[in-house]
Image (cartoon, rainbow, N blue to C red):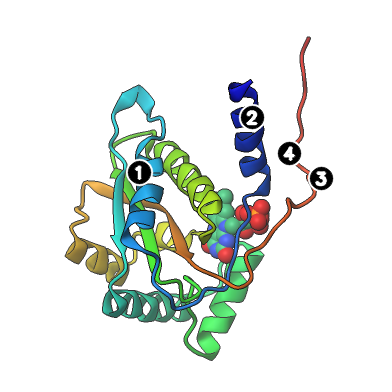
Amino acid sequence: METDVKKTEVLEAIRNRRSTRTFLDNPVPEEIIKEIVEAGRYAPSASNTQATHFYVITNKEKLAELKKLVSAVIASMQEKEGMSPTFLKLIARAKEGEIDVTYGAPVLIVTTHRKASQNAVADCSCALQNMMLAASVCKVACVWINQFFTLRDEPPIKEFFASLGVTDEDVICGALSLGYSENIASGPLPRTGFPVKYID
Ligand SMILES: Cc1cc2nc3c(=O)[nH]c(=O)nc-3n(C[C@H](O)[C@H](O)[C@H](O)COP(=O)(O)O)c2cc1C
């Protein structure tokens, strides 16, 4: 019986996880951040390599520096064929004035992996999903931030992460912004996509 209750709770947590994009300045207690990161470390990894590396940034100066760098890099970019409409809008906004792709969250978790691994993004994605679920049940708002992955080869971004210990052998994958919010999104979005085909 106890197993059934847990199953319902886990499935509910999966359904109710949402992306939130407004954050309060309030810091997230260290023990909660650690719980969320531990959930990421309990993700599966291809061949059990456990090679995903977690950079947990709460230092305000570093976050501000990164925000400025990313905004300047995006503002300097030319629109190119193949860029997503969302990214094109981001370029246009950055050209008008400084933007913050992290939404001012007080915590940023960036995942990296070995560049040579063909499972880098898959491993990091498993860890990121675990952390999003853990954040959701801890009532901590979060959202995946893709720009560090998209801009991973831009020199200012590489230099910044090199200063944190990311080497040329590593690749930046996905990241999460986390923090408390007065507007945590709730209720699942309708599923109109995600086609499924059962082959009996
Ligand atoms: C690979 C990936 C990249 C994403 N990148 C961003 C991003 O850079 N900024 C952002 O605000 N949301 C980003 N998201 C969040 C999606 O927009 C969000 O998951 C989607 O709109 C569905 O909403 P939900 O998470 O509330 O269910 C990303 C999600 C994924 C899976």
Marks 4/2 in contact by CB < 8 Å: the verdict is no
Q: Secondary structure at mark 2?
A: helix
Q: Which residue is mark 4?
A: 194
Residue 192 circle label: 3
Which mark is nearer the camera, 3 or 2? 2
Rounded to the nearest angstrom, the CA distance separating label 1 from label 2 is: 23 Å
Whole-angstrom CA distance, mark 3 to mark 2, is: 28 Å
Q: The C terminus lies in which quarter of the figure?
A: top right
Q: Nearer the viewer, residue 149 or 44?
A: 44
Distance from Cα at disc 1 to Cα at disc 4: 29 Å
How much space separates mark 3 and mark 4, taking CA atoms?
A: 7 Å
- Report how many numbered discs are placed on residues in the image: 4
Residue that appears at 54% across and 77% down: 91
Q: Residue at x 25, y 63 (%)?
A: 161
- Place of residue 129 in the rendered image (x, y in percent of width and height, measured from the top left): 50, 44
| Beta carbon of the mark 4 residue lies under 8 A of ligand 1 | no
Cα gap from disc 4 to disc 2, whole angstroms: 27 Å
Q: Amino acid at mark 3?
A: Thr
The amino acid marked with disc number 1 is: Glu
Q: CA distance from mark 3 to mark 1?
A: 33 Å
Indicate whether 30 appears above or below 104.
Answer: above
Which is more foreground, mark 4 or mark 2?
2
Q: Earlier in the sequence, mark 3 or mark 1?
A: 1
Q: Earlier in the sequence, mark 4 or mark 2?
A: 2
* Residue ID for mark 1: 38
Horizontal and vertical percent position of residue 40: 39, 43
Q: Which residue is mark 2?
A: 5
Who is closer to the viewer here, 14 or 197?
14
> Looking at the image, do the residues carrying marks 3 and 1 touch, with CB atoms under 8 Å apart?
no
